[in-house]
């Protein structure tokens, strides 16, 4: 394809913690002028075929996508993969194992919420919000707490209970950085550090992350994302230059009313950066 006018390479559907089907995210993306799209559900590729089909129906170009949860320096970090073969057995097995940790963690989150709020049936309640039970995640609990009247908003649920370090937060060991990067790259894709401003790393820890990421084959960083302010985009544009990384752009859209940024509504990448899609020309469908 020629240079995309509006690429959105990070969004979620009911295959993880989004609230819309892949078809509805595709329709919304297309309606907002997206011409190169990737659905990047957490730790799974179950929605990829439907997303590709829907992209075709709307005349959008498509890159396969995923967002892998990893643990680096005792912190949860997200690695986006783009343009991989979604049938690659090592990738599929790695993602299955990563999702496999979610159920036990969710039961513990539910126990804590029952103790903290006095309500019962929290595990079953949150599961009702999960389109894909294996992908149960904190936003499903947040939506349950809002609908029960315990919290005013999902944001409020994270601030009071579910956010990192809050009383219903259950620490979890996700995949290793090198494993996630290898699953993606060995399947023909490009690995990208998602929303780097979201991690609470100091400068030394952040430098270690990018150095280790490059050493194991990582090639990209999200510069323009719904999770970054304009100042943070400027900062991570500098990171892309310093480490020679490809730049990515994605809203991190989870659903109407849930995300700071709607799908397809981001500012452009800084003109001097090399966009990640330029390295994925043969993988664009
Ligand atoms: P989990 O994978 O279960 O740890 O849930 C992580 C997901 O929760 C992220 O992908 C976001 O969708 C959402 N999330 C994380 N932190 C917040 C926050 N502070 N406010 C709202 N949503 C959040
Ligand atoms: Mn999410
Ligand atoms: Mn993320
Ligand atoms: Mn995301």
Image (spheres, helix red, strand yellow):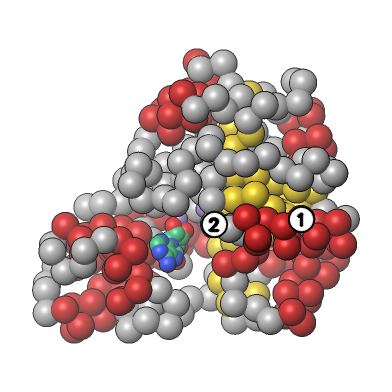
Residue carrying label 2: 227
Secondary structure category for the residue under label 1 = helix
Residue found at the very far front of the displayed protein: 231
First along the sequence among labels 2 and 1 = 2
| The C terminus lies in quadrant | top right
Q: CA distance from mark 2 to mark 1?
A: 14 Å
Mark 2 CB near ligand 3 (8 Å cut)? yes
Q: Tell me the SS state at disc 2.
A: loop
Q: In the rendering, at what x and y percent does residue 40 appear?
A: 55, 45
Dot 2, how many residues are within 10 Å of its Cα: few (below 14), some (14-19), or many (20+)?
Answer: many
Residue 40 visible = no
* Residue 99 in picture, x, y percent from top left: 47, 59
Residue closer to the observer: 100 or 11: 11
Indicate which disc residue 108 carries.
none
Name the side, left or right, on which 262 lies relative to 62.
left
User: Is residue 240 at least partly visible in the picture?
Assistant: yes
Query: For mark 1, does the 10 Å Cα neighbourhood hold few (<14), some (14 to 19), or many (20 or more) residues?
Result: many
* Residue in the image at 42% along x and 42% along y: 13
The residue that appears at 68% across and 39% down in the rendered structure is: 268
Could you tell whether 93 is left or right of 114 in the image? Answer: right
Point out residue 250 in the picture as x, y percentages from the top left corner: 59, 44
Of residues 182 and 222, the one nearer the viewer is 222
Q: Position of residue 218 (x, y in %)?
A: 78, 57
135 relative to 14, above or below: below
Above or below, 39 against 155 in this view is above
Residue at the spot of label 1:
237
């Amino acid at each position: 394809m020629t240079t995309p006018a509006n690429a959105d390479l990070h969004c979620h559907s009911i295959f993880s913690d989004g609230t819309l089907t892949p078809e509805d995210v595709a329709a919304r993306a297309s309606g907002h002028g997206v011409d190169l799209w990737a659905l990047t559900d957490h730790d799974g590729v179950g929605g990829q075929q439907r997303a590709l089909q829907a992209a075709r129906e709307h005349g959008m170009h498509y890159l396969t996508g995923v967002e892998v949860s990893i643990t680096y320096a005792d912190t949860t970090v997200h690695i986006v993969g783009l343009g991989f073969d979604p049938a690659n057995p090592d990738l599929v097995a790695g993602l299955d194992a990563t999702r496999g940790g979610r159920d036990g963690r969710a039961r513990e989150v539910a126990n804590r919420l029952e103790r903290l709020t006095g309500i019962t049936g929290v595990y079953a309640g949150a599961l009702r919000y999960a389109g894909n039970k294996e992908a149960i995640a904190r936003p499903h609990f947040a939506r349950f707490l809002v609908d029960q009247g315990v919290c005013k908003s999902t944001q409020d649920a994270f601030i009071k209970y579910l956010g990192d370090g809050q009383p219903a937060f259950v620490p979890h060991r996700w995949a290793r950085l090198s494993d996630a990067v290898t699953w993606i790259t060995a399947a023909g894709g490009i690995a990208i550090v998602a929303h780097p401003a979201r991690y609470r790393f100091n400068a030394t820890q952040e430098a270690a992350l990018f150095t280790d990421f490059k050493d194991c084959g990582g090639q990209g960083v999200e510069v323009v994302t719904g999770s970054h302010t304009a100042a943070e985009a400027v900062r991570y544009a500098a990171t892309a230059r310093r480490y020679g990384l490809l730049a990515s752009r994605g809203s991190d859209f989870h659903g109407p009313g849930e995300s700071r940024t709607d799908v397809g509504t981001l500012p452009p990448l800084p003109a001097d950066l090399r966009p990640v899609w330029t390295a994925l020309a043969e993988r664009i469908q």
